[in-house]
Structure formats: structure tokens, C-alpha cells
Amino acid sequence: MSGAGEEFARWINVERLGREPLNINIVASDEECREIADRLQIPALHSLQMSGTVERKAKSGLIQLAASVKADAEQSCIISLTPVRQEIEEAFTMCYTFAREDTLVEDLDYVVSLEEDDLPELIEDGRIDLVQAMSEQVALALDPYPRAEGNENSPVSDTIRDLEKEADEVDDETHKPFAGLKDLMKKN
């Protein structure tokens, strides 16, 4: 999602961030909402705002953004292409680091579980872009299969539900590290 919100940005310098948290509040204008909607490839973003704090964590030295984002997004129904509105309200936490090695994964087979924290983002030129973080959270919260009312029971909708169910089953299987152990033990 590196392209989301590139031109509309709110940079804050975090190099000299002290012990006290910095309160932030961003309300996107109509023009800024249109720009982010274009970047996210959705028809419209009717409102977008974020509030929270940015602070330096004493023990780790990481910079933490703890915020909540609210948005009124519009997508196209995957069946009829009619507009579908979605209210988004998400709380999130992101960490940033000055050290590039903190952002790298040494093990190529490393899998992040749902319980683990994400790797920190790299701070570039001593500053972070709050709009980038806000745009990413909106993108993550968008319904991947938006459906307009009345399209829930169509044959296409049934096929999509089946595909979603299959995807969930595959996801469930990937989070079972010892699932094949029983079969392996029978072979010995």
C-alpha cells in the first residue's frame, strides 16, 4: 500500500520527540478524501479522520502511533456495481524504528501470527507520514467483497460465499502447525 496517500501527507518530525506523547488529530478535506479514494481505487471516501498519540517507548526506543481512524467509504458492489457505503471505525497501533535492521526478517520462512506485533516501519529522514498510516488502516478495514442490499441471495453471491468459505478453511489449515504430525508418526 505504498502509494496510498502519497500526495496528501502529514509529516511529523520524530527525531526530537520527548517523553511526553504528542497528540494528533487529522481531518481530511473533500479534496484529500478524493485523492485517497483514488489511491485506494474506490469510488469515494466521504469522510476521513484520525486521532491519537505519537510517543517514544522508553525501553525499546521505538516510536509508537496509537490512534483510531474513522471513515465513510464507498465501494462498488461486486455483483451489480451499485454503490455500497461502509462506516469504518478502527483502533490501531503502529511502531516505527530508526534502525533498518529492525525492519528485516532474517528467516525466509518467517510467518507472522495473528498474536504477534507487526515489524516496525522504518523512519525516513527523521519523520513519519501520518496519512500513510491512516490510509493503510482504511485499506485494511475495507470489505473485500462489498455487496449491495438485495444481492445477498443471487447465484453469484452464493458462489462468492462458497469461495470465502474455502478461503477461511485454507486459512484455518495454515494456522495448525502440528496438523500433519499424526500422519507422519504413523509412517514411522
Image (cartoon, rainbow, N blue to C red):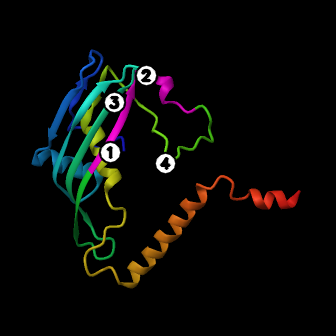
Residue 183's quadrant in the figure?
bottom right
Residue at x 10% of width, y 45% of height: 29
Q: Amino acid at mark 1?
A: Glu
Question: How far is the residue under mark 3 from the one under mark 4?
Answer: 19 Å
Residue at x 24% of width, y 55% of height: 88
Question: How far is the residue under mark 2 from the one under mark 4?
Answer: 21 Å
Residue, disc 4: 114
Q: Secondary structure at mark 2?
A: loop
Outermost residue toward the right in this view: 188
**Callout 3 environment at 10 Å: few (<14), some (14 to 19), or many (20+)?**
some
User: Taking 99 as reference, is 108 left or right?
Assistant: right
Q: Inspect this view and state whether residue 5 appears.
A: no
Q: Amino acid at mark 3?
A: Gln
Q: Secondary structure at mark 4?
A: loop
Residue, disc 3: 64
Counting from the top left corner in percent of width and height, residue 61 is at 40, 20
Say which quadrant the N terminus sits in.
top left
Q: Amino acid at mark 2?
A: Ser
